[in-house]
Image (cartoon, rainbow, N blue to C red):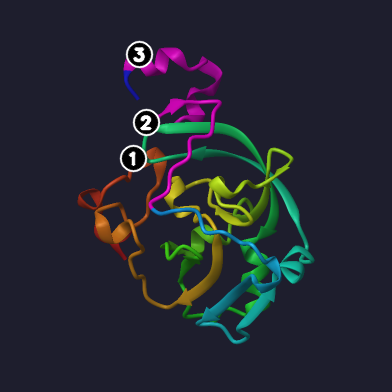
Amino acid sequence: MSKLDAERIPPELRHRVPPGQTLTQKWPVLHYSGIPMFMDMSKWQFRVFGEVDHPFSLSWDEFRSLPSVRRTSDFHCVTTWSRLDNRWEGVLFATLAERAKARPQARYAMLHSFDGYYTNVPLSWLMADDVLFAWSHDEKPLSEEHGGPLRLVVPKLYAWKSAKWVGGIEFMNENKRGFWEERGYHNRGEPFLEERYSYQETEETRE
């Protein structure tokens, strides 16, 4: 962050704000396409497939019946804003991975959304205890403009990895680039290292 931006952030919070970011209490709305409409939730299906021993699909009611958790985490957008202390409720990614019995060779996942968006994340990041599929934000149902009824939340990566309107997990043994990753964004997207663009990638982060 610039010297001026840093001066605007309370000293006790500066260690939580990545370089190049400014704080906001608002929640800006950003996505590449229109908002998909879910008029009939009885037809909503969440798919888990790929390198797993037990692929499965869940209806909305089945998904909501899974063990749920609450987590509080910070949220960093590559467009340079950060929002701290977001309160989420939903299902841990690890819960679905364990149910599907991800195979040992599965090292990556592609998250698929109902609007056609997709993004890739290594399983080593997704299995963390703060990564969840959230249906609630700050004690309210997740609004459609912010990814409702369900979005992924990966707090330690830039927010384009936290796919909105998510509808499936594809487990993979090789890393494939997602929508923005194919269009010049960084393959990993770690905010505190400012991994914004593909030209910044190393051999390690490209794999």
Label 3: which secondary element: helix
Residue type at mark 1 is: Glu
Which quadrant, please, contains the N terminus? top left
Residue that carries the numbered disc 3 in the rendered image: 4
For the point 47% across and 69% down, the residue is: 109
Residue with the mark numbered 2: 19
Identify the secondary structure beneath mark 2. loop
Marks 3/1: CA distance?
18 Å
**Residue that label 1 marks:** 194
Residue 6: name its quadrant. Answer: top left
- Residue 150 percent location from the top left of the image: 62, 57
Is 20 rendered above or below residue 179? above
Q: Measured from the top left, where is residue 196 in percent x and y?
A: 31, 45
Q: Amino acid at mark 2?
A: Pro
| Residue 110 sits inside the magenta stretch | no
Disc 3 marks a residue whose amino acid type is Leu
CB under 8 Å between callouts 1 and 2? yes
Q: Is residue 22 magenta?
A: yes
The residue carrying pointer 1 sits among few (fewer than 14), some (14 to 19) or many (20 or more) residues within 10 Å by Cα, namely some
Residue in the image at 56% along x and 26% along y = 25
x then y, percent, for residue 201: 25, 53
Q: Is residue 101 above or below residue 124?
A: below
Instruction: Please tell me which of labels 3 and 2 falls first in the chain.
Output: 3
Check disc 3: other Cα within 10 Å, few if <14, some if 14-19, many if 20+.
few
Residue at image point 51% right, 16% down: 11
| Magenta extent | 3-32
The image quadrant that residue 18 belongs to is: top left
Q: How far from the left and from the top, in percent, is residue 49?
A: 54, 80
Q: CA distance from mark 1 to mark 2?
A: 7 Å
In three-dimensional space, the C-alpha distance between marks 3 and 2, rounded to whole angstroms, equals 12 Å
